[in-house]
Image (tube, rainbow, N blue to C red):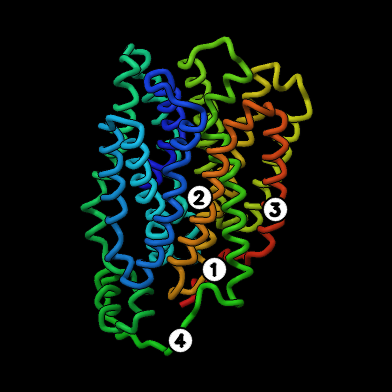
Amino acid sequence: MGFFTDAYDLFVVGVVTTLLMPLWHLTNSQIALLNGASLASAAFGAVVFGWCSDAFGRKTMYGVEVCILFIGALLSAFSPSYIWLLISRILVGIGIGGDYPTSAVVASEYANRKNRGFLVLLVFAMQAVGLIVGPLFTSFLMILHVPYLYIWRILLAFGALPAASVFYLRRKIAETPRFLLSKRYPLEVSRVVSVLTGHEDKITIAVDIPEKLFSLKWLKCLLGTGGAWFLLDVVLYGNGISSVLIMNTINPHTSLLEHTLLSVLIFLCFAVPGYFFSATYVDKIGRKCLQIIGFSVMALCYLLIASIPSIRRILPLFVGLFGVSFFFINFGPNATTFLIPSEIYPTQIRARAHGFSAAIGKVGAFIGAFFLPIMLKNMGLPIIMVFMAIASLLGILVTCLVPEMKEISLQT
């Protein structure tokens, strides 16, 4: 459910800062910092939870991250001041960041090689639900004419509910057999396997050479997984958090509610199907190929928006092309950058590698969320789209650094 809150926040925090600007008299810099606070702290959370999951076990850490997320979301909703809100958003970010390596690795290590991509991306597809619930819930509150003074608090408090709902279930999940094998616990592996399969088998283990994450052996892969995630998140979070601002640039004479509903249309018709298409076809197309396809179409869409003025003047044209870019974000690198790090590294460093890759991605997310509103105001939309296209093209290059894991078993 961390992915629900991640996507939910992706939209809601942009609305919250828009509402708080006149209420708290916030400056553009304060808004940009608030937009990016949870993203920056998510990088810290991903690294810490990734390291702890490799050191102490997947089961030990699974659920702790949603507990932190829950506390941070509640504190956000009851914030009496800007500093309080900023600190509580940092807590939310730590929880969101921690969910990346823990959920990805647990799902990957329990899945079989034939449909591993499908199963891992089904976990990630909770982002799709959050992406829709955020703007829909916001629109619902506005239609009811709930005062803006309360709307932002309700929106932030709602983000705590999914985290609370899964805490107990996560704490009951058994340790993954692959982790137990990596720690030389064959008897415990036998017990877990017998519970899962109904058969009692004696498990034996071989001695492996200890792996180091930052060794030359894995540097190329880290550049591939971390670099692609960084470039993706510059684009995804820059466009996602600032979607209301971008809509206002294209169509400045409409209300916040209308801009919100336009964002709902884009997310529902384009972004959400992308998640489920990626889960359905990733095991057929392959992770690497799908990532290259996604980055390529994204770059094309952004270049067309930047270079053809009529697209920016005619709202349906802009919404359609901007929507296609969101479809291929999700039917492409947003899914695969989450999946690939959970597969290509050995068990000893899998969670750390995934956490490090996610952390690099969240640094990109912070850059996109922090600088895009400022650049949009000072440079205009065409320049922003050129930057997005360049980031997407660079994403194609770094994707070439990672191996294809289609129907290949995980390393022990």
Please indicate, yes or no, whether residue 48 appears anywhere in the rendered image.
yes
Q: Position of residue 390 (x, y in %)?
A: 72, 44
Q: Position of residue 8 (x, y in %)?
A: 41, 36
Q: Earlier in the sequence, mark 1 or mark 4?
A: 4
Q: Residue furthest right?
A: 307
Name the image quarter holding residue 26: top left
Gap between marks 2 and 4, in whole Å? 32 Å
Gap between marks 2 and 1, in whole Å? 20 Å
Disc nearest the viewer among 2 and 1: 2
Q: Could you tell me which residue is drawn at 35 percent across and 80 percent down?
A: 183
Name the image quarter holding residue 226: bottom right
Q: Secondary structure at mark 2?
A: helix
Given contact means CB atoms under 8 Å apart, are the residues at marks 3 and 2 in contact? no
Dot 2 crowding, Cα within 10 Å, few <14, some 14–19, many 20+? many
Q: Nearer the viewer, residue 166 or 14?
A: 14
Callout 3 amino acid: Ile
Q: Secondary structure at mark 1?
A: loop
Q: Earlier in the sequence, mark 4 or mark 3?
A: 4
Callout 2 amino acid: Lys
Residue 208, numbered label: 4
Quick check: 105 left or right of 188?
Answer: right
Gap between marks 4 and 3, in whole Å? 34 Å
Callout 4 amino acid: Asp
Which residue lies under the disc numbered 1? 344
Callout 1 amino acid: Ile
Q: Earlier in the sequence, mark 3 or mark 2?
A: 2
Gap between marks 3 and 2, in whole Å? 19 Å
Which residue lies under the disc numbered 2? 362
Quick check: 405 left or right of 130?
Answer: right
Q: Secondary structure at mark 3?
A: helix
Which residue lies under the disc numbered 3? 396
